[in-house]
Image (tube, rainbow, N blue to C red):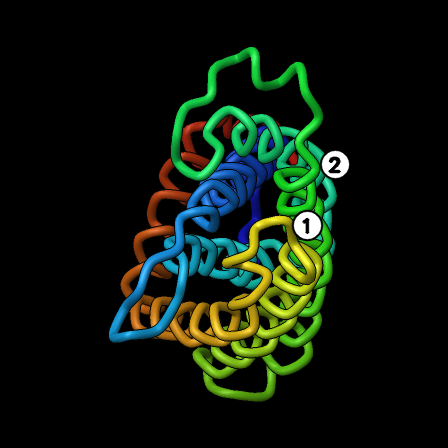
Amino acid sequence: MLMLTTAQLRRALFLLVGFHILIICVSNYLVQLPFQLFGYHTTWGAFSFPFVYLATDLTVRIFGQQAARSIILKAMIPALMISYVMGVMFHQGSFQGADSLAQWNTFVFRIAFASFAAYLIGQLMDIKVFARIRASRSWWVAPAASTLVGNLVDTLVFFSIAFYASSDSFMAANWPEIATVDYGFKLIVSLGLFLPAYGVLLKVLQDKILRANPQESIS
């Protein structure tokens, strides 16, 4: 774990919370945009959400489990609210205008709430798996295993809550296939980009954290 001043720790947590919220909101928008790849139904959200797991694993490795859980708890409510607003205003990829917020959108709220539940459960599972095996295996085993388990839990929880018996007939009929394909693509993205993304995120995080005032000490 890094030895950081109080200011640097606050800055790190702020940056990581913001990153989590950004990825969740972008993914909740992109999951409304299904397409076919190699004949399989999937969504663009499968290619963005895995970066949350990279950020979580980096957090556990650098700051420990407590900081990672703190980030999840701080990010989930703002992410739920912002995801709903974005989902209503940009429903199925089309800008609906600010007036669309005057009417309650159950379909979009199901997606936002499903993301809330899946994020909370999946991320806590990811942290638990990562922390349990990080000290007893090669450095890559813990993040790889936590990614496999966390993404599986997240995908099952999200798609079952968001699209089971949904008012969107296409998603209601195809969500099991889409969930399976999404999980596969999440693993490809997570594991295929794991090393370079890990290094890039770590460097960016360290550079931005260390800009804080080094004179303060950790309380």
Position of 72 with respect to 200 (left or right) is right
Check the image and report above or below for 72 versus 57: above
The residue indicated by pointer 2 is 219
Give the camera-side residue of 29 and 18: 29
- Residue situated furthest top in the rendering: 99
Q: Amino acid at mark 2?
A: Ser
Q: Which residue is mark 1?
A: 67
Question: Residue 157: which disc?
Answer: none
* The residue positioned farthest toward the bottom in the image shown: 137
Point out residue 9 in the picture as x, y percentages from the top left corner.
Answer: 60, 38
Identity of the residue drawn at 48% across and 37% down: 22
Identify which residue is drawn at 46% across, 79% down: 139
Which residue is at the front of the view, 212 or 129? 129
Indicate which disc, 2 or 1, sits on the residue closer to the N terminus: 1
Q: Identify which residue, 32 or 5, lies in the foreground.
A: 32
Residue 5 is at least partly visible in this image: no
Is 50 on the left-hand or right-hand side of 159? Answer: left
Query: Residue 177 placed where, x, y %?
Result: 49, 74
The picture quadrant where one finds residue 10 is top right
Foreground: disc 2 or disc 1: 1
Element marked by disc 1:
helix
- The residue under the point 40% across, 64% down is 42
